[in-house]
Image: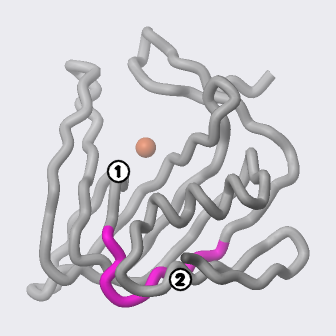
Amino acid sequence: MYTFLKSGNKYIVSTGSNTDLIGEITAFCKDQGIKCGTITGLGAVDRLTLRYFDIVNKKYLDKEFTGQMEIANLTGNISTLDGELYLHIHIVVGLSDYTALAGHMLSGHVSVAGELVIEDLGIEAKRKFDPQVGINAYDLQ
Ligand code: FE
């Protein structure tokens, strides 16, 4: 279970170790009622599912990775889709051979620490499925 401190419209959030990173972020955003915001993060995971969007075929390709991976950067935004919380998170992780993996983060198991800064922009940013592109795009009107 996460712990946090608030400063203005920003929160520093710790997921602790051995936690479900997306689950913790989701719970935090729901608990605080955040409907538009940004997320940045550091830490380490030992299981990660990445998603790559194949633009030509409009298809998501998902792949799971295991082993110690350092979160070199986690960047995301918070919005809603059909009234439900919607997280769009990209992650770059560093491996033991100093190479990196990157993609959308579908799921991640925190091994050591999950250190996040979440900013609540205080409004609601909606999304809607855009069939032309094949993604849940911003619907900012
Ligand atoms: Fe993306």
Labelled pair 1, 2 in contact (Cβ < 8 Å): no
Part of the protein shown in magenta: 109-117
Residue drawn where x is 60% and y is 64% of the image: 39
Crowdedness of circle 2 by 10 Å Cα count: few (<14), some, many (20+)? many
**Nearer to us in this view, 72 or 28:** 28
Quarter of the figure that contains the N terminus? bottom right
Amino acid type of disc 2?
Answer: Glu
Residue drawn where x is 64% and y is 82% of the image: 3
Residue 134's label in the rendered image is none
Q: Disc 1 marks which residue?
A: 106
Query: In terms of secondary structure, what is the magenta stretch mainly?
Result: strand
Q: Residue 35 in the image: x percent, y percent?
A: 74, 45
Residue drawn where x is 14% and y is 63% of the image: 65
Quarter of the picture for ligand 1? top left
Q: From where the camera sits, is residue 62 visible?
A: yes
Residue at the limit of the structure toward the left, as seen here: 97
Q: Is residue 111 above or below residue 21?
A: below
Tag count: 2
Amino acid type of disc 1?
Answer: Leu
Residue at the limit of the structure toward the top, as seen here: 132
Q: Disc 2 marks which residue?
A: 115
Q: Residue 40 in the image: x percent, y percent?
A: 57, 70
Q: Residue 89 in the image: x percent, y percent?
A: 47, 54
Q: Secondary structure at mark 2?
A: strand
Q: Is residue 115 magenta?
A: yes
Q: Secondary structure at mark 1?
A: strand
**Residue 49 occupies quadrant:** bottom left
